[in-house]
Image (cartoon, grey):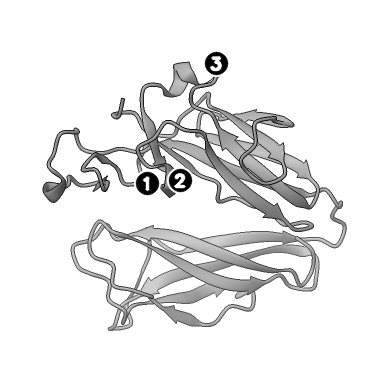
Amino acid sequence: MPPTFEFTKTWRLENSGSCTWTTGYSLVFVSGDQLGAPDQVPLPTEVPPESTVDLTLQMTAPDVDGTYRSEWMLENEQGTQFGIPGPFWTQIQVTAAIPENAAHITGLVWSDLCSPPGAEAQDTPQGCVALADGVVIADGIYDVGEPRVQGVTVSLAEGACPATTAVATSTTTSDGRYRFTGLDAGTYCVFVDPGSSNNAGVLMPGAWSWPEDLQGTQDIAAYTIELEPLLSATDAYFGWDFQLE
């Protein structure tokens, strides 16, 4: 990114312990480059065991070219710091010599796991949610250890969604990731058609658990993404529940 560029960093953390993280816990800076962030930020909500929380910081790139790493941990009410293990971090490379089409879009397709279907809605299994019609599906949250899906064709179109004509495609690799690079600033639609000739043999049968507005359907999943100059968008995740037919 260019010097003095302002950006947002979010970590999604899972409480894998046995006690609840309260709002007395904080995200704290421990080492490296602080990148304009505050020393600590209280947790926005309580996080019971096996739950997740998104922790977000507003950061600013330094004004000198170079590589910068910012390391953070959690701290409880007694001042004890803990990690996963050790600090979690973000790392950036700052350079003034960035081409205009340096923006890119990345993301992943993952297999969203849910306990065997058939449970009653009032007794929703772990990792699942009950929809309004009582159908129980995977919860749409990417949890540590959930498999990634290889071989899914992700399409890119110019303009806002919905879109059907792709200007580029990317096939997910063994780690479930896709990537579109060398993009100019503008509006793009990133979408996955599970019923296409490329994807039907990989995804079907099943249904989307994420994005949220497609939970429990087999429709085309899509994100409209506004790319600013030099800005990378990396949050276009697609969750698929293979248990639903």
Percent x, y for residue 222? 55, 41
* Left or right: where 208 falls relative to 162: left
Q: Mark 1 and 2 residues: CB-CB less than 8 Å, in contact?
A: yes
Percent x, y for residue 118? 15, 34
Question: Mark 1 is on which residue type?
Answer: Gly
Residue 211 shows which numbered tag?
2
Q: Mark 1 and 3 residues: CB-CB less than 8 Å, in contact?
A: no
Q: Earlier in the sequence, mark 1 or mark 2?
A: 1
Q: Determine which residue is flagged by label 3.
A: 197
Nearest to viewer (mark 1 / mark 2): 2
Circle 1: element type:
loop
Whole-Å distance between the Cαs marked 1 and 2? 7 Å
> Which residue sits furthest front?
133
Question: Mark 3 is on which residue type?
Answer: Ser
Foreground residue, 117 or 72?
A: 117
Whole-Å distance between the Cαs marked 1 and 3? 25 Å
Circle 2: element type:
loop
Whole-Å distance between the Cαs marked 3 and 2? 22 Å
Q: Determine which residue is flagged by label 1.
A: 140
